[in-house]
Image (tube, helix red, strand yellow):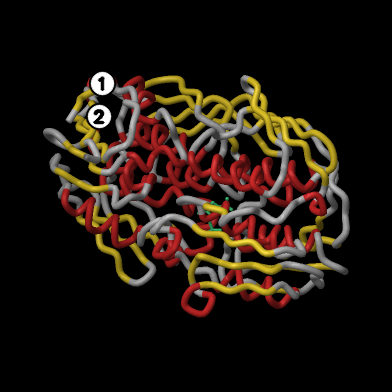
Amino acid sequence: MTDSQGATPAGGGVRSWVLGGSRRIAGSLRIPGDKSISHRALILGALAHGETEVRGWLRGADCRATLTALAALGVPVSETGEALRIAGGGPEALQEPPDVLDAGNSGTTLRLLAGVLAGRPFFSVLTGDASLRRRPMRRVVEPLSAMGATLWGRAGGRFPPLAIRGGALSGIRWRSPVASAQVKSLILLAGLQAQGETLVSEPVLSRDHTERMLAAFGGRVRREGTAVRIAGGQQLRATRLTVPGDLSSAAFFLTAAAVRPGGEVAARGVGVNPTRSGILGVLERMGAEVRCEGMRQEAGEEVADVIVRGRRLRGTDIGAAEIPALVDEIPILAVAGMLADGETRIKGAGELRVKEVDRLAALEGEFGKLGAAIRAEGDCLVIQGGRPLKGTEVSSRGDHRMAMSLAVAGLFAAGETTVHGVECVETSFPGFASALCDAAPDCLLREVVMSDA
Ligand code: S3P
């Protein structure tokens, strides 16, 4: 067992964070690149013609899995300093991979690549870690099969691994029963390679990064309400872009500041695309002061410095129509609810049951251990705020957003909190522990590594 303060020790093994409460939360932070936008920049760079240069992309395990898969499909990629260069030759330049493609923990990698591979006339297999192999894939298999690809998956196509024999696709009209950007995006990526037009609609608009990034690569997509239309056979042109900081990562610090009266955090250069920034409206509604300064555009996305000042917060209701714009922030918003006065109710959050873990069950189980009054019922989460939190041992259950949310809750708990299984944080936020030490130095976070041996 080894100890280290803040920094991430090298090597494998099961890692835990031990931290205490913090009286002061303050700082000005640069947040790593947006995960969703990074995946799309890499994939569209590979599908475009010419050399695409991407700066500021997230060098976390999830996006690395996308990059490694693209390299296995024969796409030349090179990294020099900040810049990643992708030599795209259009979809037709992709080659049959010599081995199974491993998406690791990343649902976005697996699902978006399935959309790409459905259009390619060769055999490929996509798999992932134990968590990803439990996540639903009918939503992938059904539309791609309807377009003309042949897909097989475990349990009759319900789970990965997915085997794909792609080929001549036809455009479809697809009504997705879930608001899912991954589903919408994989259909658009297949639609780009299909004969004719593809239209995909969803019950509520999900994040629209794919649509915006297609436009940045010279593609034509048309939004009509919650539907998107794309014509097949378009050629994308290489471009240069800088990925904005990830608001979903900034959210941990912004929320920590929001719930601490007198706390203040500025997250510089983060994406505030309205289909992603629902958390800011919720924190404001709960009583925090939220400001976006220096609004600008990067990679077709709105970017700003987001500044949050803490006040005593009150509970709120979050309805089903709001969920897509804050779906990844529910774990940290649950922390805000626990520390606010009164009740917070989050409704229509059933998609959380099929994330990296069943997040509703994980929130009830792990935050319950800290003394929170939090109940998951069906697709709802109900939190009675204002209960004092007491430090104890909790587990990420292998979910990066659970790990980071539990660490933030630890800042507000009495005594010491130990979060086990924090190695998963590498998927989306390498450097989170150091950033937390900067924003809340008196929490005295240390990382403990249990060796694998
Ligand atoms: C993502 C979409 C969301 C989100 C995930 C990233 C994306 O998933 O939860 O972290 O990049 O498209 P769903 O499409 O399953 O809602």
Q: Is residue 386 above or below residue 162?
A: above
> Residue 198 location in percent, x, y?
79, 68
For the N terminus, the quadrant is top left
Mark 2 lies on residue? 447
For the C terminus, the quadrant is top left
> Residue 376 location in percent, x, y?
29, 64
Q: Quadrant of ligand 1?
A: bottom right
Q: Residue furthest front?
A: 98
Residue 5's mark?
A: 1
- Distance from disc 1 to disc 2, alpha carbons, whole Å, reads 6 Å
Q: Is residue 74 above or below residue 134?
A: above
Q: Residue at x 63, y 53 (%)?
A: 98
Q: Residue at x 50, y 28 (%)?
A: 31
> Residue 240 location in percent, x, y?
76, 31
What amino acid type should be assigned to the residue bearing mark 1? Answer: Gln
Q: Along the horizontal axis of the image, is 194 left or right of 288? A: right
> Residue 221 location in percent, x, y?
81, 55
For residue 297, say whether it is visible: no
Q: Nearer the viewer, residue 284 or 134?
A: 134
Q: Residue at x 68, y 61 (%)?
A: 115
Q: Along the horizontal axis of the image, is 254 left or right of 71? A: left
Q: Element under label 2?
A: strand
Displayed quadrant of residue 414 = top left
Q: Element under label 1?
A: strand
Displayed quadrant of residue 176 = bottom right
For residue 149, say whether it is visible: yes
Q: Residue at x 24, y 55 (%)?
A: 384
| Residues under numbered marks 1 and 2 in contact, where contact means CB atoms less than 8 Å apart | yes
Q: Residues within 10 Å of mark 1 (few under 14, many from 20)?
A: some
What amino acid type should be assigned to the residue bearing mark 2? Answer: Glu
Q: Is residue 387 above or below residue 110?
A: above
